[in-house]
Structure formats: C-alpha cells, structure tokens
Image: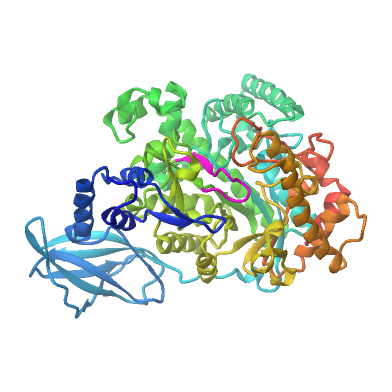
Amino acid sequence: MTDAPSTDLIELARAHGVATEYWDWQGQHVTVPVRTIVAVLAALGEDASTDDAVRAALTGVQDREWRRTLPPVVVMRAGEPASLAVHVPHGSQVAVSVRLEEGGAALALDQVDRWVDPRVVDGEQVGEATFALPAGLPLGWHEVVATVAGTDVTCPLVVTPDRLEVPASLADRPASGVMTQLYATRSSRSWGMGDAADLAELAAWAGSELGSDFVLVNPLHAAEPVAPVEPSPYLPTTRRFVSPLYIRVEEIPETGYLSGQDRSLLQWHADDALRLDEVDLVDRDASWRLKDAALRLVHRVTRSPRRERDFAAFREREGQGLVDFATWCALSVAYGEDEDTWPTELQDSASEAVEAKRQELADEVDYFCWLQWIVEDQLGTAQRVALESGMRLGLIHDLAVGVHPSGADAWGLRDALARGVTVGAPADQYNQLGQDWSQPPWRPDQLAELGYAPYRDMLRTVLRSAGGLRVDHIIGLFRLWWIPQGCKPFEGTYVRYDHDALIGILALEAHRAGAVVIGEDLGTVEPWVRDYLADRGVMGTSILWFERDYEHGGEPIQPESYRRLCLATVTTHDLPPTAGYLQQVHIDLRHELGLLTRPIEEERASEVHEQEGIMALLRSRGLLREGASHEDTIEALHKLLSWTPALLRGISVSDLALDVRIINQPGTDEEYPNWRMPLAGPDGRPVLLEELMRSPWARRLARTLA
C-alpha cells in the first residue's frame, strides 16, 4: 500500500464513517495517515491491510444491506414520514407491520410503488421492497415485523421527538443554579467526600435561600469496587450505574436495626471516616474502605417485607444489566480490578464459567445490586428535596463521554465497544498536543446491531432522578476522535456516528423523564452542529471567556448576543475557578507541567489581552470600575450573565467559596491531583458545606443571577 490513501481505501473508510482528511483548529487541512485509517478500520472489524483486502471489504459493504431482510434498527422522527427497505428472495411476497410499544393490534404498512433492480448476493437474486412508515406513529420503542413465507423477521422501530420542547416551568423567566463537584462538597457528616445527603442539603439551601432552580453535579457514575479507585468522574467503570461512594450510610433505614455490636462497629468506621475531611485531598480509597465495611454490616440486616418487595422490583426493572454489573464487581473483589489477570474463562461475560461463578458468589452479587438500589433511592430523595425547596428543575446530572478500558462496561458490553483504539481530542488552543482519554469508543455499527439498547438503558438510569442532563462532549454523538494504540493523540482521526439516531433517542428519553438536555459543545465543532442541536431542542454551553466574535477580531460578544437555548457560565471544571483564572494560575500550572507549546511570556501576554477585552466590556456596561477587587470583578462577570437571554445561568460552587485551585488540568494524569481537590477558600483551606452556607459572599454572589 502507498503512503497516500487509495481511492478504494477512501471509499471503504467513508462507508464506515472514518475521516481520511479534516481541518484542524488553526484552519489547516490535514490528510490522515494511511496507518491510522487502517488501524481504525481494523477496530471496526474490517481488514484494510492490503489493496486486495480493501477491495474484498468494499464488496462486503456493498452487499451488507442486501443480506438481511430488515435493517438492525429504524429510528425516525415523529411527524415526518419515512420509508423502509425490505430485502427478500427476488419474487417473494412480504407483509410488513408495526407492533406498538403500548400493545394492541399491529399496524399494517403500505408498500410503496417503487422498482429497484434485484441484486445477486452470494449467488442468489435478492429483491428490494419499499414500505411507508407513516408520520402519525406515537413516540416510543416499537417493533417492525416482516413476514416472508410464514416466517417473521423483526427489528426495533424508535419514534423520537422532532424537538425536545423547553419545560413550561422555564417559559416565564430563565433559571439560575449552582454547579458543583459533589465529591469535593464535603460536610461535617461526610465520610471524606460529598455524598447524596450533602447534595440534598446543598439543593435545599440553594433553592430556598439563594433562589436557585437547579444543581448541576459531576458524573456520579460507578468507579471500581476495589482500590485504587479512579479519581476522574469522567473515566467510570460504567455509565449506567452509580458510585456507591455517594451513599450516606446513616440514612439507610436498616441502620436502625443493627445489633449493638454492629452499631458500635459502624460508629467506629464513621468516626474514622470523618477525620478524612481534615485531609487536603479527597482520598477515595480510604473513604471506600471504610464505607464498604459499614455498608456490608447494613446489608446483612433483615429487611421488612415492604422493603424486600421494593428491592425485588428494582432488580426486576434493571434486569440482566444490573446482574452483569454486580457480577463484574464481585469478580473484581475476588480477582482484582484488572480483568487481564482473571482466569481466561471469566473474561467473557456470557460464558458458562461466569454463570457458575455468579451462583458461587451469589451473596456478593446481591450486595452490589443492593448498593445500586440504595444509592438510587438517596439520589431520588435529593431530587425530591430540591423540588420541594422551590427549584424548577432540581438535579442536573452529567453524562461522561466514555468508560474505563478495563471496567464493567468494557467487560459486559464487549461487543459494542471498539478494541485497539481510544477516544480523545485533536490538538486545540488549550491542549496543543491533543488529548488521549484512554476510553474505548462505541462501535457505531454494533450499537445499531444492538438496537441502541445499551445507550437507551444508560440514559434511563441517568435521567431517573433528574430535571436535566448535561452531556459532556456532545459532539461525540456526531463524531469522535479515535486514536489507534501506539499513536500520539494528534495522529488519530474522526469516526462518524448516526447523530440523528443518537440525538433522537436522547430526546425521547429526556422527554419521557421531563428533563432538559444540555450539550457541552465547546472545542472544535463543525458549524452546522450547533444549529442542528438547537433545532432538536438541545441546549448548548456558553462559557463567558470563550464567547467571542472570531469573525471580527475575536472581541467579546455583547451579553444580548448569547444564545437563548444554552447554559451560560463564567467558568467550567476544565478551567480554574474564576478567582484563579483572573490570577492566571492555569498558565503557571501548564508551564510547570510542560504543556505549553510557546514561551510562557507569550502565553501570559495572550491571556492578559483576552482578559482585558472582557474587563473592557464590563467597564463599558457600567459593571466594573477601575481598580476593582477580584471579588468585585467576579460579581461583575456573573452580573453580565444575568443580562444574557440564556435560559440557564450557572454559578460554580467554587466561585461561591472564592476557591482558586484547578479542579482538572486536561492532558495530565498523575502529574497533577485532578479530581481530588476538595472545596477550599482563597487561602487553600478546605471549606465544609456548613461553612459555605453561612458565607455572606456566597449569598451575595448567587443573588447576581437569581
């Protein structure tokens, strides 16, 4: 094969949504290296290592649709008619109908008068018949049935909203709220990190005293059940289930029925855990060691008949997905979290050996199922408290981009994830070497083969106790940056997904949950994508520092020019808190870690220029005087947000505490304690939730948006 991609290789790549060229963040055209294209196609199950292999793969792609009666799944918009191609032996009769989700008689579909020449596939002539899918089908998960020679063939039919409408509660005025890293928001009753009870307290305070309408939290997805626990909430072991680290042990009803000895043990664990709040960094390993020991005591308590029925109903609703996750947790406890060290026969989640081991570890599997029941109940309580406090939305959860390469989803959803590649991001202004997030991506073809069920089930869990959902890097539902193993982050390429299907299903599940959806659409974004998301009713993300008119010199835009359908904030978790940003702590840190690609003097000069543009805007609008303090500047920045048409305006809890420390430095791992910084004040001293709720500054700043 030559150094430049051949015409056949380009065609094969295009058939699989693999980019062979793109424009980078500086507007330069980039041709993707052949070795990258070949490696990405291999991760999609296609051999493109030789010219002959490419030609053979192309033939297979061209025949793929004709080899099956129905497509793997059909996703359509409500109110818009669609057509369905059905493939049968040439000359055969076929009848097609739709079984609706709510039951009742099947709906027969009409065949469209459309001639398509038959095709010879595997030596046989195959014909194509076209059927009309009417515009009036109800929203939901239905089933298409094709009957050929007395045999039924089925596929899922998903009817999604054309647009996710804004809740009526937001019609009269925009909503303001607080944003927090829950693990960092510790209280005097936390076991070393913030939990669901702290979330309820934060929501009650923000709703009743600050006039907030929502609390946006970091992803609460589950991490490993054994140490070391991954600190990044954006690298979970699964996105479907929740980390039991967020359980408040004392609020489980069964703790009231512990024996005297077990009650003493629980108190001993609690006393030990409370001392973790004095530690400068969040220690998840220590927190989980103590919490796990206490939770096992409570798990052994006999539940009342009512509680037992509730637990049984939860297990039935969550089905095999919950059992598989709990089994992975039990195996991790038994053999360690690195799946590669497990007995070979246990590395396949569908093997008979796994089923046998599941029976052997039944008590342990039950324990991990129980943990999910408990944490879901406590998050449900937090959402109820939020709404009772006067909030219009309550909790807004966060959905991470992907999962850990050795986690529960990588084990249980093995067929749906690509191997030999990881997800990341190409070089941009803030990460000029690119990023490798070490996560295996969804395989778009396999996700469709599974009828998008894993994606749907994940969304349903995250949306269950929420008034909204933030989707991190929502551009990943359109295309993701795949990096072959052994390559640098900037040596990857984009792989496209069926965004109509993924966004449509997201809108359907959010509609059913009565939730808003916020897409984090920062970074390198194709221009049409933001318009598409707005048309589907998905809110965008506007960060004040980044809202500039790049077509006219990059000057800050006026607040009135912000998008209406967005969450507008001053900062985000990948930037320092506002006080730290004004002090340029991010420049200092990136210099110390060797992440800059130009001299620090140039970086500082550029940052001063950009910040001064914002300060000039504040002064021109009468919000800031010369010589203002950092506190006055922070208040003016948030006041500017209140002048935007944005439907949602958020304020970071870190800003309420005047914290300066960086939560996460993209492009680093152990070089910096990412995701381990507890909430702190300007002096770096940890601040507990109770202290924050007594802060006059927090009340003053929050009221600029309320």
Residue 254 image offset from top left, x and y in percent: 59, 34
From the viewer's side, name the closer residue of 206 and 669: 669
Residue 497 sits in quarter: bottom left
428 falls in the magenta region = yes
Magenta stretch: give its range: 426-439
From the viewer's side, name the closer residue of 347 and 625: 625
Above or below 286: residue 497: below
Which residue is at a point 24% across and 44% down the rendered structure image?
50
Q: Quadrant of the N terminus?
A: top left
Residue 552 sits in quarter: bottom right
* In the displayed structure image, the side of residue 133 where residue 514 appears, left or right: right
Residue 74 sits in quarter: bottom left
* In the displayed structure image, the side of residue 49 where residue 704 appears, left or right: right
610 falls in the magenta region = no
Residue 540 image offset from top left, x and y in percent: 59, 62
Residue 654 image offset from top left, x and y in percent: 75, 46
Which residue is at a point 56% across and 32% down the rendered structure image?
230
Q: Quadrant of the C terminus?
A: bottom right
Above or below 429: residue 241: above
* In the displayed structure image, the side of residue 503 where residue 267 appears, left or right: right
From the viewer's side, name the closer residue of 622 and 382: 622
Residue 436 image offset from top left, x and y in percent: 51, 41
* In the displayed structure image, the side of residue 41 where residue 365 appears, left or right: right
